[in-house]
Structures are given as structure tokens and as C-alpha cells.
Image (cartoon, rainbow, N blue to C red):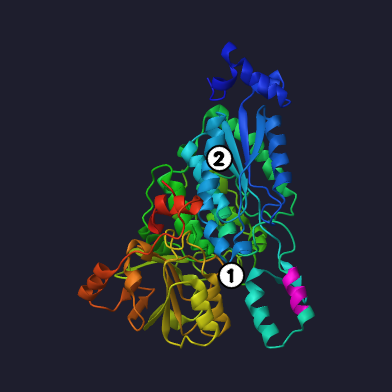
Amino acid sequence: MSRSDLLKSGITRTATRALLKAAGYDDDSIDKPWIGVANSWNEMFPGHAHLRTVAEAVKDGVREAGGTPFEFNTIAICDGICSTTDAMRYSLPHREIVTSSIEAMAEGHMLDGLVLISSCDKIVPGMLSAACRLNIPSIFVPGGCMQPGIFRGESIGMGELGDIVVQYLNKEITEDEFKLFVESVLPGCGGCTEMGTANTMQCLAEALGMSLTGAAIIPASDSKLLRMARKSGRRIVDLVEKDIKPSDIVTCEAVLNSIRVAQAIGGSTNTCLHIPAVAGELDIEVPLTVFNDTAKEIPVLCDVQPTGKHFVADIYRAGGVPAIMKRLETKLGLDEMTVTGKTVGENISNAIILNDRLIRPLDDPIYDEGALVILYGNLAPEGAVIKQSAILAENMKVFTGEAEVFESEQEALNAILSGQVARGKVIVIRYMGPKGDPGMREVTSIAKALVLLGMGDAVSLVTDGRFSGYAHGPAIGHVSPEAFEGGPIAVVRNGDVIHINVPERVLELKVPEEEIQRRLKAWKPPEERFKRGYLCHYVRNSQPTHKGAQIR
């Protein structure tokens, strides 16, 4: 008996059948497997504006394979729209709403299988978490990447915004040129052009085995995306018939595969939040030390923005995720099952690398170590995250400076822009974590401002907040425990010396331990900023960042 049979079979379920018939379904469609199509389509932003068409292709495939699709929607927030404002507080927490809303629909209607459609930052991991929590046959359909825009004959993307702002402020370009550039940066739908969180998570969904081979970063404007969506719709029916579930696919080794791919592509620091959260739904623990271990084994192979020269669409044309995994073949677990019904090794056996400059060989990498590493020390006992491949100045990998402490992003930004932060300082921004802000919004504006003002080789940034996948420079985030929960970052004072050593994975507050403990004993937690509503619920129930910051 299938899950949906509990709602549609037998004389006692005639009322259910009546309701479905009132919605336009006939006996034949009711009796087939029920496939939920969870779609994050909305009209608000380009990462999701095209997904209605993608869902139609998925539903065609489901019907062709003998299933009945039932489409429903989840919410989706765009980090780019809410960036640098209080609205960003909802970005990470809304991942949990995505997960729970899919859980509610799938359990409330006893769906037999799920197709999950999304392309952006928090929605992709939210959907993958839902699949793992429910553990019913599921397949993820990425919404693809955005094509770069064109300015003065050259391809452009989000990463060039900083450069063009400087050119405009220096009167090197006119106001009309500035407007032309900005309006050309995002020419169409899909996840933003660089390897930010959106495209990172699409790649990792495929690396986990939850998407069809080659599905991850098809440009949203490419008709292949619709063909892949239709194929995914057909495939879910077979997964239901064979009862292949996420727990058969998202294993410990599959999780390691995804982290290895994240290291090779120069993935977003948000990976360190999302992969532990997804894996945790299947009781797979992902200690942050795994990122340090894999960084030693896996070099950065992809010359892709924001740290490289090219765009995600170029990586797709060079062979995409299958080509990247082919490069890593000797480093991967090849026997893991995937939604294709084949193993990782079988999926990539015929993969072709079409451009050695974009997807480099293991013996000729962009960087010798992987992108993401975790720093430890008395300032971050549970770890802090840095994207070492985004440190543009070599001298900033080992750095010692006096702390300049701020209690908010805006306070720090005002000080930087007004010239109040001297070279040689370590900017500390605290109470930006999941519980402290609340919501752990990005403080990417600070990292960008330092680079734009030519201070990326002289000032470091340490925060219990997080960064966009586009952040550059010596930006250390996710400091855990966060300030709101009494982590040592809560008692850093102006003038305290902070030592950073990325190669040695060290983040140290050069203050005697007895003094730190004395300060912590005198410290009192601030009042909760929200007494009601969803953020209040998130603050009281979210896990710390080193465990994924999800509600458990």
C-alpha cells in the first residue's frame, strides 16, 4: 500500500475522492501515485520568476511516467533585495519555513514522492532538508544560473558592481554609463552569475546525488533546463515505484562528496551552515573540522567569480558539475547511490572536461587548498568560517591587530566610510548571530567597503554574522559561540589584540584566560529584540551556527 492509498482507497475515503474530483481530477488520475511538486516560484525576483515554466515541464514528465502531479508553492526571499537592511534578518530563518511548509504539505496529503524546484540561497537547502526530514522518494530540480550581462563588450556580473561604483565616484564614467552598467548586470532569470550561495547549493544538490547528472547549473535561458525538468518528472515516478529514498542517497560519504565539490568550486561560506543542516535531518553529524580536512585534500579547480575571472554559465559550458566531479574522481566516494538509479562513479564515467582553464587539473589548481576553512581558538572555541580563496592580499592570511568593536553592521559601515577605522585594525562586529541579530543577516557590505576603499590588505573583519558568497578579503564569520549566547566575542574590547593565522587555522584573542573569564562572568545577555512573531520563535529554537543554525 502506498502512502496516498491511506487517503484515497476504500469506502471510507469516498469524501477524499469527491474533494479531488471537485478540483478536476478523475478516477484514473486519483489512483496513480501522488507526486508533490514543491515550487518556490514567485514574481518578486529573477531566481524564481521562471520556475512556473519549469514546474510545467516537471508535471508533464510526471504524467508521462504514470503519476499525478500536485503543484504547491513555498515562500522564497531574495538576499540581494533585502541586503544591508533589517529585512535581511528573515533570510536565513525563512529556510526553516521552506522546510516545514513542504513537510506539512507532504505529510498532510500523504504524498508518495516529491519534486523540489528552486534556485536560490536559502530555499535550495530548505528543500533538501525537507526531503531528508520526510525521507520519501524525492528529486531536486535546480532552476539554473543567470547569464552574465554585457558592458562595453565584456561579460559582467554582480562581482563587478564594486569596481563600477569606484569608477563612478572617481568620475571615470558618467552617470548614464553607471546606470547602463547597473541595469545590465542581471539580464535575466536564474541564480546570480557568480559562485555565490545560490549556485553553490545547486552544485551541491547534484554532488549529493539528489539531482540528475548535469542538472545543476544549466543557464535558466537554455531549453535544456526544461528538458531536464521533464526528465526529472519522469524519474520521480520510478523512484517511488522502487522506493528509493533520500536516506539511500544522502549518506555520510555523499555529504563528504558535496563538501569536496564545495572546496573545488570555491563555494560560499554559507555551505558551512547548509550542509550540516541538511545532513542533520538524517542524523548525520557534520563537524566543522570536516571542512579543514577536505581543504587539505581538495584544491580550488574552478576559475570562477567572485574569486576567478569567469562566470558560472562558463563553468557549465566547460562541463559543469559532472566535469568537476570527474576531475575529483580519485578523491570521491564513487559507490554512492544517486537519484539517477546509478552510482556517482557510473554517472561521471563519461563526463568530459571541455576547458582546462575553467576546470583545472588536480596537479595545476587555482589554489593548492580548498576554499573553505575553519579557524579555532579562544575567540571561536566552536569555530569560525573563512573563505581563504577570497583573501586577495597574501599578507592578510597571517595578521595581528587591535580590535575595533561595533555592535551593528551600520555602526561599523559608518565608521569605515567616515575614515574612523585605521589600517592595521581588526573590525569586530558582534550580536549578528542567529539569536543576537536575530537571524544572522549578512554583513557583506563591510567586507566590500574595505576592499573598495583599498583597505583589504590592511584591515581584517571578525563577526558572528555571515557573508554573501560574493564577499572578498579577510572576512571571518560564523564565530561560535555567538555573542548573544555568551561567546568570548561578547567581551572583546577596543584595543584588545587579535591574532589571525589562516594557514594554521587560528583565531586568537591575546588576552589572558583569567581576564576573559572575569569579563564573561560580569557579562549579561542583552534583551531579546522580538517578543512575538517568527523571529522570536527562531531565536528561542535555533541551533548554533556550528550545527547549522536550523530549528531542531
Q: Is residue 450 above or below residue 362?
A: below
Is residue 13 among the parts visible in the rendering?
A: yes
Residue 471 found in image quarter: bottom right
Q: Which residue is mark 1?
A: 306
Secondary structure category for the residue under label 1: loop
List x then y, in percent, for residue 214: 62, 50
* Residue identified by numbered label 2: 102
**Amino acid, disc 1:** Pro
**Residue 459 on the magenta segment:** no
Disc 2 crowd rating (10 Å Cα; few below 14, some 14-19, many 20+) is many
Secondary element under disc 2, as helix, strand or loop, is helix
Contact check, label 1 and label 2, Cβ < 8 Å: no
Discs 1/2, front: 2
How far separated are the C-alphas under marks 1 and 2? 32 Å
Q: Which residues are magenta?
A: 177-184
Residue 84 x, y percent position in the rendering: 57, 68
- Residue at 66% in and 33% down: 70
Q: Position of residue 417 (x, y in %)?
A: 55, 83
Give the residue displayed 56% in from the left and 50% down from the top.
124
- Residue at (55% x, 41% y) in the render: 101
Please give left or right for residue 16 compared with residue 533 in the image: right
What is the magenta segment's predominant secondary structure? helix
Furthest-right residue in this view: 176
| Frontmost residue, 101 versus 540 | 540
Q: Which tag, 1 or 2, sits closer to the chain's start? A: 2
Q: Quadrant of residue 448?
A: bottom right
> Is residue 181 shown in magenta?
yes
Q: Position of residue 285 (x, y in %)?
A: 37, 49
Vertically, is 5 above or below 350? above
